Image (cartoon, helix red, strand yellow):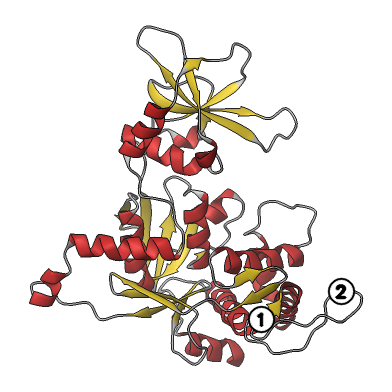
Amino acid sequence: MHDLLTRMAGDLALAQGTNERAADYERRVLWSALGRMMTAALYDRVPEAHGEDAKGVPPEGEISVVHFHRRAAHLIEAYDALFPSLGFVDALAAEVRDNPSLTSFERAEKALCDCMMANGLAYHRGYYLRPPKRTRQTLAGVAFVRGLALHEPVQVSGFGAYQKESVPLAGTDAAMVEDSNEGQQEAERVRAMFQLDAPLDASVLDRLVARGTFHPAPDDAQAEYLRTDGAFRKGYWQSRPAPGLTLARVRSPYDRKLFSYSFCRVPQRGAEEWMEVPPAYAGDYGWLAQIVLHQAGTLPPATVRRDGALVHLSCGYLYPARERRFLSLYSWPAPGARGFRAAAERVLAATFFDGFRALYEALGLSFVESKEASL
């Protein structure tokens, strides 16, 4: 491995997986090094002008959004020039599944900057960015951090930084204090820190349905219905409604990427009925879909495959937008994953995974260990 990559790996405490290929390991090192460099960029103190009059300068302690994006573009180009054979840019660009008109470098820049800002690693105010407030929340021996000073030691998984905490041994008085209620409170603090969705709870679905009124389904609606039978290899949507409560979606005639969503039920004796999903919950159907599947008992677990210093995660069902956003911060894409697979198949640091698993289990998601070796 190149001396620069070796030094980066040492500084970031990144170990190679037992069965991980050298090129995949080197790509991961570049990925995480880029994230740390962009964290440092928030502390840049370079006078810069904004607008054609060249009179504006950033407020103290802030940088412009333009500077942040230019810094990302410069670093991506520099890393690609140093290690062109690793396919680093294409892997990062694959994180953006829209905007096909953008070049690979532009999508890579967008993926990096969007991931950092969407997860609170940079505070956005008007045309400026600033480092986030120092925050540290611990769960299952992992401290989720942001806003730490650059000299403070951290470990990384993907772009995300964390620290390890000592966990009391089972059977000790200290361990007994850390009961399930305390663990739930810790998970709630981490959830609030990253603005993740509320835990999957069938009572939420019951309350939403109880507040509304069902009406006969439109006669001319060309709808698709959420598949709830667990046969997700056939897709997430089907042409006929499943028994019980499910979701229906209708594609917009003006934009094929837009849908309207409704709850759908088919009484034992009666016609199909719909109730429009409240606007506050219509932005990302994924969370509602998971609650429906959770209530039906068909929400599949994520599969975990361990490989020494790494954990390979394969989502049984694509996570909702906020959970995908958080996962993209604290993971690397699986080697060769593109498109849908890039969001569903991820690689995490094994030392971080316990905290991630505890957080997502508190959200109502489940995991199953695979004995199959990761290749």
Residue 16 locus on image (x, y percent): 45, 78
Residue 5 higher or lower than 122, as above or below: below
Q: Nearer the viewer, residue 283 or 293?
A: 283
Position of the C terminus, as image quadrant, is bottom left
Position of the N terminus, as image quadrant, is bottom right
Image point (32%, 51%), residue name: 366
Task: Name which residue type carries label 1.
Answer: Glu
Q: Is residue 86 left or right of residue 294?
A: right
Q: Return the residue at label 1.
A: 62
Q: Return the residue at label 2.
A: 51
Q: Is residue 89 visible?
A: yes
**Comes first in the chain, label 2 or label 1:** 2
Image point (49%, 20%), residue name: 274
**To which quarter of the image does residue 304 belong?**
bottom left
Image point (46%, 65%), residue name: 347
Q: Is residue 351 visible?
A: no
**To which quarter of the image does residue 186 belong?**
bottom left
Image point (17%, 69%), residue name: 178
Looking at the image, do the residues carrying marks 2 and 1 touch, with CB atoms under 8 Å apart?
Answer: no
Task: Name which residue type carries label 2.
Answer: Gly
Residue 54 locus on image (x, y percent): 88, 81
Residue 109 higher or lower than 365, as above or below: below
